[in-house]
Image: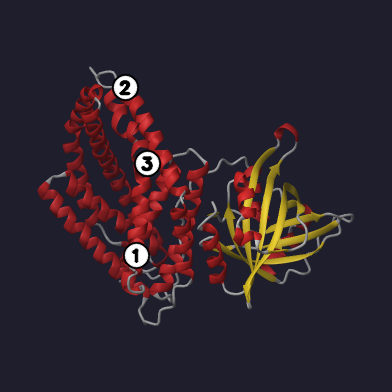
Amino acid sequence: MAREIELKLAFPPEALAHIRRHPLIAATTRVGRAQTLENTYYDTPDLALGKALVALRTRRIGRRWLQTIKSANESAGGLSSRPEWEQAYDHKAGRFDFSVVDDVTTRNLLEKNASCIGPLFTTVFRRETREFAPRTGVRILLMIDTGHARSGNGEAARETPISELELELVEGAPGDLLDYALQLGAELPLMPEDVSKAQRGYELLHDKPPRAAHATPVVLDSAMTPRDAFRALAFSCLHTWQANALGALTHDDPEYIHQLRVTLRRLRTLLRIFEAHLPLGFTGNWQLQLGKLANDVGQARDLDVMYESLLREPAAGTGAPDFDAIVQYLQTASQTARTQARSVLHSTEARVLLLQFGKALHTLPGETADIELLGFSRDSLRKLHKHATTRLKRAQTSDTQEDLHRVRIALKRLRYTLEFFASLFDEKAGKRYLRQVSRVLKELGALNDIAVGCAHLRHWAQAQENLREISTWVTGWHAAHASRRSRRALEEIADLLDIPKPWKKSRNVTGAT
């Protein structure tokens, strides 16, 4: 069994010539001739292999045929590592040989389903291979792949392009691979991505439209040190950061930018929680850079939701003025903001930031402090709950939008932190509590969208005389409802903060406190 460690970097097809000519690539050593690789991926009718994260393919290279099996991919910040078994394939006989698979679970799965395994989709791409060997002990293969994945035949066929630079570590440390990627990324339009060619094929097979990536649960081991837990959680956040940044550049769905902003907020909360267990200056440095990126892309999301959150209901009200002018103005402003957000994400600074954060996590030294993760997580949640309670009391007496917004931020941090540590506590209690927090935050989010939207309206009305009447109408309409909604939200928050806390009960330990 081999274990490949690789980093996949997507690039726009039109950048291929520029990539080939770049000195850091042009100076590398060619490995053989460029080849066209024709791959067929196989699975059972019920997709048993794909569900188990096992990929089975045959590859034709000229007259040669290979059989390759890959099992579950471990990905961290775009850098992936997965077991791989490769051997010659007898294409004429058309029979698979699973005898080389030394992982019992993977081999049993393949042999159990051998009789019903059939072809699903294909990938065809041109591969140029080079070797980068800057010093003794470091060797990195570069594979430039351009082509397509295809599912189906004839008019029912569906295709998606393949355009990526794959770096595979042959000799050296993961940091060497990331250092080289950083040098390339400083001058080339490269974006880390975790999507394999097999995943592309499965998405085509299901005719599944691309979607924004949401946070996924991370199972923590209570025996972990706080720093190890931080690393695992941060890698998960980095995965959604990469996916949504790339998605925002290639798709119009505004949900990509929204989920990117959510991810950056989660990361900043994570850094704040674990600050005492990270190297000096680590949290401050990354808080600053992630905060700047979130602000640079944030306005696009604010404007994308502005019609639904601010204009739709007032526009349907009795005696409402003509909304055409403001809707047109909003559409133009929203498109401009989205273009600016894409420009930010496409910038060298933003692309390199992804790689730099990945390297920072990979090279983060271990922690020797003997601190129990369970106790640390409980203490963190208690502090955040106390902070939210303090914010609530202030908002109850001040009755201002600013203080209500501060309560919202405190609750968000509490929610993110409980999600981070959820695997350590009672599952049912945690899910129930998170549902209640999410319900309250949804209302607080709606109130915040209204406040942000009204601020935009007032600003636009100062420069556009034809928007002044509609601005006054809309802000007045919402002002008539805002006080009642805010009071009700404060009551719901008070009820939420008073219910039993899920972090008082450990997973599978009834009554633990």
Callout 3 secondary element: helix
Question: Going by the picture, which residue comes out furthest to the right?
Answer: 92
How crowded pointer 2 is (Cα within 10 Å; few <14, some 14-19, many 20+) is rated as: few
Report crowding for label 1: few under 14, some 14 to 19, many 20 or more residues within 10 A (C-alpha).
few
Per the image, the residue denoted by label 3 is: 301
**Residue 491 visible in the current orientation:** no
Residue 64 in view (yes/no)? yes
Mark 2 — residue? 325
- The residue closer to the viewer here, 349 or 496, is 349
Q: Nearer the viewer, mark 3 or mark 1?
A: 1
Q: Residue at x 28, y 70 (%)?
A: 379
Residue 423: quadrant of the picture: bottom left
Dot 2 falls on a residue whose secondary structure is: helix
Q: Is residue 11 above or below residue 311?
A: below
Q: Position of residue 46 (x, y in %)?
A: 67, 49
Q: CA distance from mark 2 to mark 3?
A: 21 Å
Q: Nearer the viewer, residue 482 or 282?
A: 282
On the image, numbered disc 1 is attached to which residue? 285
Residue 233 sits in which quadrant?
A: bottom left
Image depth: mark 2 or mark 3 in front: 2
The answer to whether marks 3 and 1 mark residues whose Cβ atoms lie closer than 8 Å is no
Q: Amino acid at mark 2?
A: Ala
**Along the line of sight, which residue is nearer the eye, 33 or 116?**
33
Label 3 crowding class (10 Å Cα cut-off): few <14, some 14-19, many 20+? many
Q: CA distance from mark 1 to mark 2?
A: 43 Å
Give the mark nearest the N terminus, 1 or 2. Answer: 1
Q: Could you tell me residue 247's position as x and y percent?
A: 50, 46
Residue positioned 26% across, 62% down in the render = 384
Query: With 228 as the anchor, is 4 left or right in this view?
Result: right
Three-letter code for the amino acid on which mark 3 is drawn: Arg
Residue 389's disc is none
